[in-house]
Structure formats: C-alpha cells, structure tokens
C-alpha cells in the first residue's frame, strides 16, 4: 500500500506538539495511527525493550477483530 509501518510496535507514542497538531488536522473519524503517524514526516526514533509474557489471562482481541483491524488499515490508504 506504500505505507511504511514499524513491525511489532505498540500504539503508544510520544509526539511533539507540532506533530500532534499535524495529526489533529486529519478529519477522518477512525484514524489508522500506525499508518498515519509515519506519513506526518516528522523525525522519529525507536525505543527497544524486552516485552514480558502476558501474566494474566488471555487476549481480549479475538481473531475476527484483528482481521477487521487489518482491513480497516488497508482501506484507510488509497
């Protein structure tokens, strides 16, 4: 789709006020942040850490919801 996303990253981000204002300029209701934020064109860096195993329960994100999330991401970019 021409969008560069960061594999295996979380949806948490630290954005400058300038980047946040650029993100706020998008008028879409359901933003696919993993694709939109890199398109903003601001400098970025990665913070690597060792992710521990889940210690409580199972994921509440079923397979169907993951598929819908993927389709939403694909449909978000022409």
Image (spheres, rainbow, N blue to C red):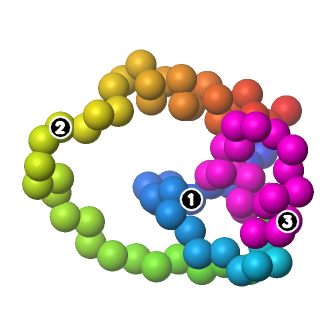
Q: Which mark is residue 6?
A: 1
* Residue 77 vertical position relative to residue 53 in the rendered view, above or below: above
User: Considering the numbered disc 1 on the image, is that residue within a helix, a strand or a loop?
Assistant: loop
Give the foreground label among 2 and 1. 2
Going from the N terminus, do you reach mark 1 or mark 3 first? Answer: 1
Residue 45's spot in the image, x, y percent?
Answer: 60, 80
Q: Position of residue 35 (x, y in %)?
A: 69, 50
Q: Is residue 36 magenta?
A: yes
Q: Quadrant of the N terminus?
A: top right
Res 37 visible: yes
* Residue at position x 71%, y 80% in the image: 16
Residue sitting at x 11%, y 49%: 56
Task: State the predominant SS element of the stretch in magenta.
Answer: helix
Q: Is residue 42 left or right of residue 59?
A: right
Looking at the image, which residue is at 79% across and 60% down? 23
C-alpha separation, residue under disc 1 versus residue under disc 3: 20 Å
- List x then y, in percent, for residue 49: 33, 76
């Amino acid at each position: 789709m021409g969008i560069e996303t960061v594999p295996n990253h979380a949806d948490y981000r630290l954005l400058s006020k300038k980047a946040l204002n650029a993100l706020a300029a998008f008028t879409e209701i359901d933003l696919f942040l993993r694709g939109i934020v890199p398109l903003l064109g601001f400098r970025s860096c990665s913070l690597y850490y060792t992710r521990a195993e889940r210690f409580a329960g199972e994921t509440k994100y079923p397979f169907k919801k993951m598929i819908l999330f993927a389709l939403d991401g694909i449909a978000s970019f022409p």
